[in-house]
Amino acid sequence: MALLSSYFHGLLRFTSPYYVVNFMSLVTYLYLRTQVLLYTDEHGARRLEDWEQRTSSLLVIVLIGRFLRSSSPDEFVATAFLFCKASVAFLAYSISPRLLVWYLVLFGVLELTVYQPVYRGPCRYEYLNPMEFDDRVVNEGKDKPKDSWLVCFFASWSPPCVHVEPTFAKLSERFTTQSLRFAKVDVARWPVLAKKHGISTSGVSKQLPTIILFEGGREVARIPHVYPDGRVAKGRFFWSDLVKGFELDMRYARSRGSGGGGGGGGDADKKNK
């Protein structure tokens, strides 16, 4: 029952103001168009319906493509809102430029005041500050840590970080053992730690989120990859890409085989440092 309650709580984020208000802003078009059609001649009504059919057909095709490329429901819904708003803006312009201005103002206000919520479902990762990170993950002293750590460097203001959160949380649920641990580092709070590991925290950074695997205190893999010339590869944060890229199946089996059973109950909750 507790497990079902946790997953249900994770789904509640889709009832937050971000989703409700953005959905309602799109629904207003349906009401406005009915009012417009009351005062539009037959030719104008047919013209509007023709544009609506073309726009909706193109929108469906685009959304199907984006659905297949989205790493989480959060990412897909945010993308769907963006393209639906663009479609509504175009149709509003076909009705009246003044209606377009009204929608641009509305969408702009929503963008600045309502933010997409972060996934709050079940997880088994920890939040680390720089002291804990140095002590438990890398430990530059003589006693190197024996555990493997998969660490997500994130910023709460970054949409890609919000979108990857459900996947990372579920990975921690699936693969955590006593010797394979998961953690997160908030680069907004600890920018020096991010810079130390070559992660840009600028507003246009292509490195947020960055997920790094540490073994024996050393970095052995990261997504997205950074080339020697400083170029950043496009990060793919699908479940299958992360499992394959960090060889989590193999590491999990090896950890279990060496006696590293499932992590203790203390890992089941986020410890916000």
Image (cartoon, rainbow, N blue to C red):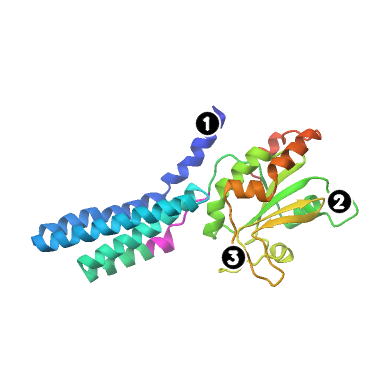
Q: How many marks?
A: 3
Q: Is residue 158 magenta?
A: no
Q: Which residues are magenta?
A: 109-118
Q: Horizontal placement of 72 versus 252: left or right?
A: left
Q: Is residue 11 above or below residue 5?
A: below
Q: Which mark is residue 144?
A: 2
- Foreground mark, 2 or 3, reads 3
Distance Cα–Cα, label 2 vs label 1: 39 Å
For badge 3, the amino acid type reads: Lys
Distance Cα–Cα, label 2 vs label 3: 31 Å
Image quadrant where one finds the N terminus: top right
Which of the two residues, 74 or 237, is positioned nearer the viewer here? 237
Q: Residues within 10 Å of mark 2 (few under 14, many from 20)?
A: some
For badge 1, the amino acid type reads: Leu
The residue singled out by tag 1 in the image is: 4
On the image, the x and y values in percent for residue 195 come to: 70, 66
Q: What residue do we see at 55% from left, 41% from top?
A: 121
For badge 2, the amino acid type reads: Lys
Q: Which mark is residue 217?
A: none
Sequence-wise, which precedes: disc 3 or disc 1? 1
Q: What residue do we see at 44% from left, 54% from top?
A: 66
On the image, the x and y values in percent for residue 4 come to: 52, 31
Q: Horizontal placement of 55 versus 193: left or right?
A: left
Distance Cα–Cα, label 3 vs label 1: 36 Å
Q: Is residue 79 above or below residue 181?
A: below
On the image, the x and y values in percent for residue 14 come to: 44, 45
The residue singled out by tag 3 in the image is: 206
On the image, the x and y values in percent for residue 146 come to: 83, 46
Sequence-wise, which precedes: disc 2 or disc 3? 2
